[in-house]
Every structure is written in structure tokens, then in C-alpha cells.
Image (cartoon, rainbow, N blue to C red):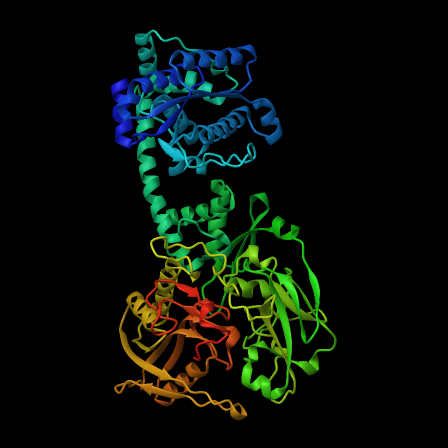
Amino acid sequence: MVKALEQYIRKLRLVRPGERVGIAVSGGADSVALLRAFLELAPGFGVVPFVLHLNHRLRGAESDADEQFVRDLAAQHNLEAAIESEDVSALATLFHLSLEAAGRRARYAFFQKAAAALRLNAVATAHTRDDQAETVLLRLMRGAGTNGLAGIHSSFEFSRFHVSTLDNSGDNGSGARIIRPLLATSRREVEEYLNLLGQSYRQDSSNQSPEYTRNRVRSGLLPSLERDYNPRLRQALSDTAEIAAAENEFFDRLTDAALGPDPDPEQGIELESLTTQPIAMQRRLLRRVCRYLGLSLDFAHLEELREFALAGRAEQLALPKGYVAQVVRDPQGPSRLFLFSAEAEAAEGGYSLELPFPGSVQVGGFFGGPETAIRATVLNEDSAKLVYHRADLLRAADLNGPLVVRNLQAGDRFLPLFSKGEEKVTRLLQRLMVTGAVRKNWPVVLSRDQVLWAPGLPVAKQFAWTPGDGNAIAIDVCSTNGNTCNTLTTGRSALAQLSFKTLPLENYDVVVSQAQLQARIAALGRRISHDYEGRAIYCIGVLENGFIFLADLLRSLHGDVRCQFVRTNVREINENNISTTEIFYTPELDVDGQHVLLCDGIVSSGLTTEFLVRNLKARGAASISVCALLDRQSARRVDLDVTYYGFQVGPQWLAGFGLGAPTRERNLPFIFAAPELGGLCMPRN
């Protein structure tokens, strides 16, 4: 047995030289055999063993005798031991668990605590091949996928096992791992090894009780199946677990590639990307997102969620534990599936503050950044023309008395400037990729219970200022000292978990990650290819901001694709609200009768894009669609339809992935907010 154990440990690299390894010893045959065998192998492996024992206090004097046996065994071999007791029966009552589940939770809480105290690198448990066979058979009878059939894993990190409800002492040893060196060893081999050594061990009387399902499988079902169907059933079940574990690891990697290792359900799942996956991957993607929320779904609920997502109806689906799934349909972009806790949102508090004009009011760090304020500034007509975008301006004549700033509420609706219809503010913010956790405290500005504005969105259309309306009120976000705030979060800005650990990203505030960019561009390519099926796609790329985006988009397009470029040089004269635009084309540009796809990296005011559209129409284009990686609708000055866009963004200055200053950081594979570039100044396109 010892030789086979050594081979198994070396094959899977379960331990490394210099490590401190705790051996979980209950006193039973399996754990005692593991300890004795490990003591023989420890010098060769170069590891330091320790003894761990938890008295579950379930069998009175018998449990105490087990504890004393382990103490004596550790002393006999001069081993340091961590031995504690826990009232598992009381825990089962407290947490509404079975005795088996409560015992497992108590053991792992103890292991984590001991790992931290003894600075252990690993904790070895004595699960054998027989335990593996029993586990796989039990899960198969209950219903299990590949993950369940993988059975008992040979090793895993403590961080995967959450037991914080039992121990809130701080350091939980999460850097350690659990290892199962005996998974290739049968219980018969264990007993033969102990008999050879003359080593005594304890018998757990509860292992004979028919009260526990595992005991009935061990003593009745498995022997019956071996006798009547397959004498090598335990080995077959163990082999099945090993195959399933390897395949599950492979599928996990595919899931990581499709969704990322740390998906954020509050960013939503793009339905187009989900529906193009095979059914198996659809289930895994949804299960991964649910697991991130702490929501475990059985097969029936998972299928209900999958079918709901594929239907794509703008409705809600109730899920277990108070969770809700909702599809948000965007006529200009991809529909998304969102998962959130309805109970958590209902439990959130709120605020309501008076906003005088001129004046400001503090609203805290509502986007996860520094303390901020909402500011209202009164401008005369000339100042309004020269300084601000229309999307930030309200007609002063329509506003009587102070405004109100409060947190977003579920039923808030309004009609933003340049939009075609009234919508819920929640849905508009979802399209900006503002997470649900952030939306709960997102401020909105109201007058007489009508929503006028929210950060990242244009003002309400019916209250929007236009030249000739007299004084205007400008609404914006600023820091508490009155400076303009550039880190207004849309998407993963101030809350982003930086994905590119190999790059020096300490100073980058990532708004759109590389994985998000590539996934979204691929989805755009599929949609455009479908819409242009049977027609040549005549791509015209706007240089400066759009060159990297266009290169990636072209590779994702199918069919007959042709490409030309334009370079724009914009000069705006604001006298009498007249804007003059100069534009330079490539000499060979000819769009007569062509179906044009006008592509740019970012569309903000829309002045240049609208000018290009009008010019291309005049040159005889059969049709023109606008495609932008980033759409900044809140800065729009003209009525412009962006047919295809990747992401909607707020008013921060963005750089990376072809955007930003010509001499800086345009080659970075992600897009980040760059407040150091100054002000609310935006690229004029």
C-alpha cells in the first residue's frame, strides 16, 4: 500500500518538499493507515506531518475515547497535534442541517483554523477508493451532471469551501489546500496494511447504523450490485469519477474562456453569445453565474432559467432564495439576461435631498469611488452655447423651486434626450453596464416627482434646453471640493477587478476589459454578417479612434467585405451656434450603390458622424449603417441613429484600444478611464 500511495502522491504532485501537512485522524482504520503510511513517506517527500482531530461529541464516551486514542497515537510518534471538540448536533439544529452536513461543515472549519494556526500548506483526509465509489453511486441516484460524477476531488483549495458562518476569527487558512492521497487505495488494502503493522484503530459504531444512507449503500446496495452485476463495480465507479473530473476541468476552462473566471451577474449575460453556445455550455455558463451569486439550482430550475433566457422575452422569472432573472431588450444593441436578489434590493435604504440652483448636494461615493456631489449651475444663454452639451442642460424657465436628488427607485421612468420612447431608468443604466449593487444608490434628479436627469444619461427630453430658451441649468457630478468628477462609473470603471496581471495596471481604471471587448466584437460581427447576408459590406473606417476596433471587427465578418478609410479633421466654430466641419477622404472612395457600414471607435456628440452620413448619402450610397465600439449618448448634439454599438459609456475620458492621445497607450488591449487627461473634455466626433 505504501508504494502505491507514494506513486499516487507523486503522480498528482499532492505535496512538495518543505511543506507542512496536517493529517486528519479520526481514529478509524482509514485515517490511522494514512498517518502511519505518511510517516514512512515524509522523509522522502521532505514534508513535516502534524495530526488533526475534531471530536464531534455525537457518541458520548465513545467519541471521547477516540479523541484520547488520537492523542496517544500522536504522542507515540512525537507529532504535534491540534485537537478540538465541537457540538455537531447543536450546529445541525442551529443551521437546519443533517448531522452529516453539519459534521462536514464543522470539520472543514476546524481544518481551516488549524491550517492558519500551524501554518499548514495542506490537510490530508483519508477518503479511499471505496468512499469514492459510494459517493459517485449516491450522486448518480440523486441525479448529477459531470461535476457531481467527478465525486471526491484529489485536491482543492480551502477557498472553495465556505464555512464563515462557523468561524469569523479572521485568518482562515485559505492559502492551504485539501488533499486525498488514498483515493486510489481500497479499504481492504488499508486493513491489510494495518494488520501487517499490528496497528490498532477505533471502530465507529455509527458506521453500522442504517439511519445513514451512505451506510446502507456501503453495507447493502454496493455488495448486492457487485454480486449480481459487476464484481469490479467499485473500481468502475472510481474510474468514472476520474474521467468525469478530467472532463469537468476541461469544460471549466471553456467556461472561463467564454465568461471569464469571475463573472459579474450584475453586468448581465449577452443572450446572443449564450444562444450560440451548445446546450451543455449554456447550462455551464448559467450555473457558473448562479454559483457566483451563491445560488445553487437543481436541474429543473436551471432548465427553466435556460429556456427563459433563450425565449428572450422582456419579462421576469422567479428563482429560489428570492432571486429574479430578467431579460433586458435593447433595440440598438444586444439583449441581456440579469440575475439579482429582489429581496436585497427591496431591503436597501435610500436618501432624498434638496438641490438648490445654483448649489450642490453631497451624495456619497455612489459609484464606489470618492465622495461626490450633484451640482446645479445657472447659465445665461451665451454661456450655455459655448460651454455645455445640450444633454446636460435644463430649461430654467420650467423649473420652479428646488430640485430633489434621491436614490434610484424601481419604478423610475423618463424620456432621455435623443431617445425615441420613455423607459425605466434601471434599464438605461443596465445598458451602461452599471451593476445592480451600484444602481441601488445611483442618484436621480427630479422636479415635482418627474425624473429630469441621472448621471451617465442625457436630461429629460421635455425639459431639455435649446438655443433661444433663455437661461439654462447645467447638472453634473463633481467632487465634494467642487472639481469636475471624471471617474463617473459606467460598466466596470471604479469597481473593476483588473484582469491583466502581467501588465503594470496599478494606475489604470479599466472600463472594458480585453475579454469583454473581444466577446462583444465577435457578437457584433455575427449580427452584422447576418443583417448583410446576400449583400456586400462596404466598410468605411474612421481613422484615429477606430482603427484597432475596425481591424478586429473585419476579422469577425463573413461574406463579401470591402474596406476603405476616411480621416477626419474637425474644427468647430461656436459663434451663433454654427459648427463647421472639415473632412478628408481617401482619394479612391466611391460608395455609389454600395451598402455602407460606417465604423468608428467612439461616437459622442455625433456631429462628425452625422456629417459623414449626409456626405455619403450625397455620394449615392444605397444604405448607411453606423457602427461604433463605444456610444456616448449623453453627449449627443444631433439626432443620430447608431445601428450597431458595443458599449454605452458615460462622460469620462477614455483611452486604450485605439482611443486616447495619439502618442500614449493606444496599444493597450483594454479601455480605461483616464482622468489625468483633464476635465470633461471629450473627443469631438
Q: Position of residue 644 (x, y in %)?
A: 42, 71
Q: Position of residue 562 (x, y in %)?
A: 27, 76
**Rendered image quadrant of residue 240:** top left
Q: Position of residue 352 (x, y in %)?
A: 70, 62
Relative vertical location of residue 496 with respect to residue 124 in this rendering, above or below? below
Relative vertical location of residue 313 with respect to residue 9 in this rendering, above or below? below
Assign the C terminus to one quadrant of the image: bottom left
**Rendered image quadrant of residue 498:** bottom left
**Would residue 119 be found to the left or right of residue 59 on screen?**
left
Q: Position of residue 143 (x, y in %)?
A: 44, 34
Q: Nearer the viewer, residue 436 or 478?
A: 478
- Does the image show residue 622? no
Q: Nearer the viewer, residue 390 or 355?
A: 355
**Residue furthest to the top:** 198
Total marks in image: 0
**Residue furthest to the front:** 481
**Would residue 158 be found to the left or right of residue 536 on screen?**
right
Assign the N terminus to one quadrant of the image: top left
Which residue lies at the image location 47% right of the left edge and 41% below the top edge? 299
- Does the image show residue 682? yes
